[in-house]
Image: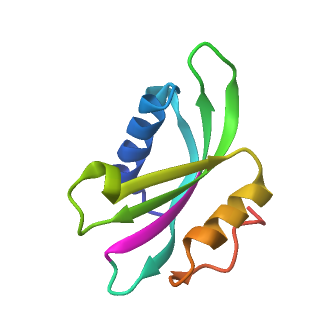
Amino acid sequence: MFQNKTTQKDVRTWFSENGYRGEAISFQYLELYAIKPPGWEQIFTFEVDAQEVNKEVRRVYGVVFDDERITKAAEKFRVAICFDRDEHQKKLDEWSVGFIAQKSVKNR
């Protein structure tokens, strides 16, 4: 599978800006989960090992919304993180309403 280096970089930056050591994140996966035609709006799913500053490494499941039409970073790129798979799947389901989406990531 190919890697999305731009989205990985954006996720690392988000973690750094939100109290984690973004440079130390270890991606288990990051992939496109859903897309809304014609393709500007995309939902990505990811799983990482992340460390809050001065704390333990922790498994984090995340959802990314990216809209390629928007140039203002705060509106273009949003991240939600979860600490269990069920919560992660609920967030994916919620964010991907109206999108063409994968069935589920529960069996990862």
Residue 94: horizontal and vertical position, in percent? 63, 70
Please give the name of the residue rendered at 66% of the width and 42% of the height, measured from the top-left corner: 60
Residue 5: horizontal and vertical position, in percent? 36, 50
Q: Is residue 12 left or right of residue 46?
A: left
**Pick the front one: 24 or 14:** 14
Q: Is residue 53 left or right of residue 76?
A: right
Residue 92: horizontal and vertical position, in percent? 62, 66
**Residues in magenta?**
40-46
**Pick the front one: 93 or 26:** 93
Q: Is residue 102 above or below residue 105?
A: below
Is residue 83 rendered magenta in the image? Answer: no
- What's the magenta bit mostly, secondary-structure-wise? strand
Please give the name of the residue rendered at 79% of the width and 59% of the height, measured from the top-left corner: 86
Q: Is residue 10 above or below residue 66?
A: above
Please give the name of the residue rendered at 43% of the width and 39% of the height, measured from the top-left corner: 14
Q: Is residue 6 left or right of residue 97?
A: left
Q: Quadrant of the C terminus?
A: bottom right
